[in-house]
Image (spheres, grey):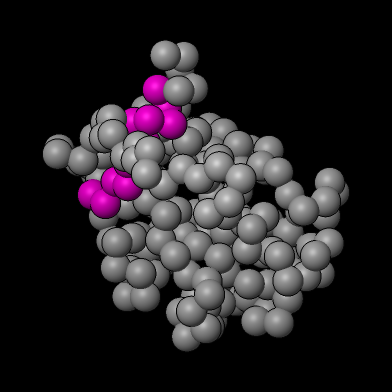
Amino acid sequence: MTDFEEIIKTRRSIREYQDKDVSDEDILKIIKAGMQAPGSRLGAEPWEFVVIKNKKTLAELAEIKPRVKTAPVAILLVANIERAFYKLHWQQDMAAAAENMLLEAVNLGLGGLWNGVAPTEETMEKVADLFGLDNENQKPFCVITIGYPAEGWQNKFMDKFDEGRIHYEKY
């Protein structure tokens, strides 16, 4: 198995973290991985990122998304709709960026968790208000928490393959 195969097969949702800072260098690597994701059209990728390390802000965000509570850092993925080529497909572009980021976290020896925000309007509004987003053109998509996994929350292989879900030519 190549290193990349190992990363894909061992990535798990990490919901609790050690009280240990994540370096700015690693945060930047994770964001760069997100920006390498495929988008609906080259040069029209909608993604923007808000890095949240301030404990007070993380606590306020945890009131909306409780799993943020133990994370040393969270990254809010925001879709800038004005930049999106396909205005109705921004969530697909954002999802690709989010998955790249989660895989890069594993590559760096970290854990991550995708905390959904979109498409729930109430949650989107609360997050947009907290971070001063323009609700019309800046859409919060998800919050990815990043950190060193707490004991019992390691990235490890879990076989999820199910041949019964594969169909050829027709469903």
**x and y percent of residue 77 in the render?**
57, 59
Q: How many marks?
A: 0
Q: Is residue 126 magenta?
A: no
Residue 19 horizontal side relative to residue 124, left or right: left
In this rendered view, identify the residue nearer to me: 113 or 128.
Answer: 113
> Image quadrant for the N terminus?
top left
Q: Nearer the viewer, residue 134 or 19?
A: 134
Residue 168: horizontal and vertical position, in percent?
55, 42
Name, please, the residue furthest toward the top: 1
Q: In this picture, is 22 found above or below 5?
A: below
Residue 53: x %, y % from top left: 43, 53
Per the rendered image, the range of residues in magenta is 6-16
Q: Is residue 144 visible?
A: yes
Q: Is residue 1 left or right of residue 136?
A: left
Give me the residue at 63% from left, 72% from top: 139
Taking the spot 15% from the left edge, 38% from the top edge, the residue there is 151
**Residue 31 can be seen, yes or no:** no
- Residue at point 38% right, 30% down? 9
| Res 37 → quadrant | top right
Image quarter for residue 35?
top right
- Residue 147 x/y as whole percent: 34, 42
Q: Residue furthest left?
A: 152
Answer above or below: position of 168 versus 52: above
> Image point 29% across, 46% down: which residue?
14
Q: Nearer the viewer, residue 21 or 118?
A: 118
Q: Is residue 12 highlighted in magenta?
A: yes
